[in-house]
Image (cartoon, rainbow, N blue to C red):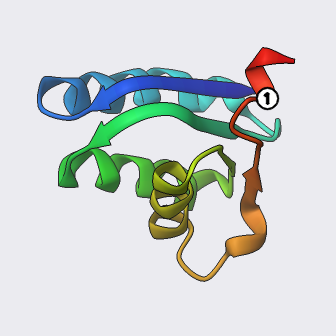
Amino acid sequence: MVIQFEGRIAGPWVAELGQAWAEAAPRLKSRKLSLNLCDVTHVDSGGKQVLKRIYAETGATLIASNPWTQFLASEIAGDNEDEIEREPLNASLE
């Protein structure tokens, strides 16, 4: 299962993400989760906390494509750098 994020994870969208995750988490069961961060443009501290919680609960693979999203993925994963997939910047153009 892949959750693809786009734009900003900040302000009211943090609560929306938390609620959406609370509804989706029970349906995940034993499926592997990937969090695609490639199109994220901004994350505030609340957004990082929700992403860290989702990551901690699932051990999801984080997908990042540019230096900023790779840095964000590193902050979320902490010492688990092997859980980050780095995609080329123009992968969507192929």
Determine which quarter of the picture holds residue 24: top right
Q: Residue placed farthest to the bottom in the image? A: 79
* Location of the C terminus (image quadrant): top right
- Callout 1, which amino acid? Ala
Which residue occupies 42% across, 30% down?
22
Q: Relative to 42, does residue 79 appear above or below in the rendering?
A: below
Comparing 48 with 92, the one in front is 92
Which residue occupies 43% across, 33% down?
40
Q: Relative to 11, does residue 87 appear above or below in the rendering?
A: below
Determine which quarter of the picture holds residue 21: top left
Q: Residue placed farthest to the top in the image? A: 93
Q: Relative to 86, does residue 21 appear above or below in the rendering?
A: above
Position in image of residue 68 (x %, y %): 46, 53
Position in image of residue 5 (x %, y %): 49, 26
Q: Which residue is mark 1?
A: 91
Q: Residue placed farthest to the right in the image? A: 94
Q: Relative to 89, does residue 6 appear above or below in the rendering?
A: above
